[in-house]
Image (cartoon, helix red, strand yellow):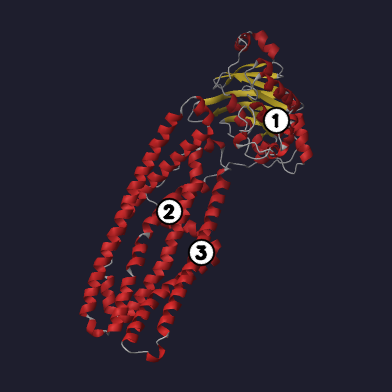
Amino acid sequence: MINIRLSSKVKLSVFLSRFFGYAKKQMLAFSLAFIGYGLYAFSQPAFAMLMEAFVRALEGEYVDSLYLVPLMCVAIALLRGFGSYLGSYYMSKVGANIVHGVRCDMYENIVRLPMKFFDDNKSGRLVSLFTYNSNLMITSTTQSLKTIGREGLTVIALLGYLFYQSASLTLTFLLLGPPIALAVVWISKKVKQLGHGIQASTGELNHVAAETFSGIRQVKSSANEGNEKDRFFQISDLTKRLGLKLAKFSAIYTPFMQVMVIIVMALIMYIVLLYRGSMDTAQLVAYVTAVGLLPKPIRSLSEVHPKLLEAAVAAEEVFTHIDLEQEQDQGEIDNVNLLGKLSFNQVSFAYKNDQLALEGVDFQLDAGKTLAIVGRSGGGKSTLVNLITRFYLPTQGEVRIDDVSINQYKLAFLRGSISMVSQQVVLFNDSIKANIAYGADDVTESEIVAAAKAANADEFINGFPQAYDTIVGENGAMLSGGQRQRIAIARAILSDARLLILDEATSALDNESEVKVQLALESLMKDRTTIVIAHRLSTIENADHILLLDDGKIVEQGSHEQLMQVNGLYSRMVLRDFIDA
């Protein structure tokens, strides 16, 4: 399994550097957001100044312009509201655009990763990257930037006003800040540790749910709902307990900070009373008002660091997947007319360590011929197919098409030249027409219909009220097994690939469906190089060449007649009228 290991120490600076790499594309919205935060911040000391003006008006000053005080109040409220709107909207816009960019970059890279990555990683965990991780990363970061922008500028504006009123008082106030900083460091460590645990358990939770829903037919047919429920509940309970621990530290954090701020305010008020001879009543009211406005933004700022750490933990895995090396594609041959000759030259392959799944496989199949691969389960049949499609690269030896190493072909061209029809047909929740045309560019509706007719699918398709526009449901749930197979065959016919791989294509069908699918397959196989993996004798006895694989080695090969004359393993399997899939 490819393990994405999170470093023991999240590098916040590295995360912020990556984040601002996306944010710089949103500089206009970013700038407008901070202009809004600046307007909001200015309204706070303006409110303190309003209190000074109000007290002076009560003391008999501004007799000729009393109306200005309420007008100032309205103006400050409008300024504050407009600044808050401007900042919140444009920061949300920045966040939405960044999460879109991150998701697209991650998706683009993940779909181009080697097949080994998908074999080794759970789909539920990958889905979690696009939902939980990316959302948490952007939401926490933009909220933190909003706090830094709005509350940070507010603190600066208020401190500037306080220094203007009394520098000595304000310096005393600032000396009481270190205890707050120590609290931030202590709780931040706890938040980081719990953040890792919550992400891991959430990914596992998504995987279990996705696995259950995708295999719901098997779950229900096995009456295994209870066990699946227990498995889900167990992981959900772990996620809940980790979340509660995180909530506990968050809950401790806020009241602790509030108590600290109130203690600081009490000391400030005491000092103000000692210094009251140096200020008149209006100035004292304004000063205390400004001090009273400081706790909220300071408390908000103290919560930024844990939030950014939480975002960094989520982002580390996201950016790790964005940075994973894509599938190698160094081939240069593209858009040539392939004949379809296939050869394996002493090919060996190991999935892990030195345990060989294929060893010394050597054969040649002429263009337009049919090769049947038989053998026990785990003998190497599927591995051989994975090497033809370059899902994996040989450990030793070489796979060639038309006497050219498949590594020399461009990957998209190579795979576009190979069609596969398997027992597990993959259909998308779209129309029949779209599923037949999947992977084919610029095809007409008449070509789609012609492919469906060749696959013996046109009749049942037109039996639906919406015909070719019928939505097949998730993974073709609205269709029978035989219908899904014929849609897959129509797709293969439309692609017009020179090489065809049939992987147990009829093994799960009833007799009636198998006859129809077999007729469609005969149409598909005509003039194409075909590799058939099957266990039914009727499917393989007409093949031009047969390989019998056992423990990753070719133990027998030849035509059906030749292998029967050898009187070896193949003939014994045929006499039992059974070839293990």
**Mark 1 or 2, nearer chain start:** 2
| Residue at mark 2 to residue at mark 3: CA–CA distance | 21 Å
Q: Is residue 8 left or right of residue 180?
A: right
- Label 1: how many Cα within 10 Å (few below 14, some 14–19, many 20+): many
Question: Which label sits on residue 311?
Answer: 2
Q: Secondary structure at mark 2?
A: helix
Image quadrant of residue 242?
A: top left
The single residue placed furthest to the bottom in the displayed view is 64
Label placed on residue 547: none
Q: Residue drawn 29% across and 59% down?
A: 255
Residue 182 visible in the displayed image: no
How far apart are the two marked residues, 3 and 1, measured between alpha carbons?
A: 51 Å
Residue at x 66%, y 34% (from the top left corner): 405
In this rendering, the answer to whether 502 lies above or below 559 is below
Residue 246: horizontal and vertical position, in percent?
34, 49
- Label 2: few (<14), some (14–19) or many (≥20) C-alpha neighbours in 10 Å: many
Q: Which residue is mark 3?
A: 89
Disc 1 marks which amino acid?
Ile
| Amino acid marked by disc 3 | Tyr
Q: Position of residue 217 (x, y in %)?
A: 54, 29
* Mark 1 vs 2: CB contact within 8 A: no
Q: Are marks 2 and 3 in contact (CB under 8 Å)?
A: no
Q: Nearer the viewer, residue 142 or 16?
A: 142
Pointer 2 or 3: first along the chain: 3
The percent position of residue 464, horizontal first and vertical second, equals 71, 34
At label 2, the amino acid type is Ala
Give residue 41's quadrant in the image: bottom left
Pick the quarter of the image with the C terminus: top right
Indicate whether 202 appears above or below 182.
above
Which disc number belongs to residue 489? 1
Disc 1 to disc 2, C-alpha distance: 46 Å
Quadrant of the rendered image containing residue 233: top left
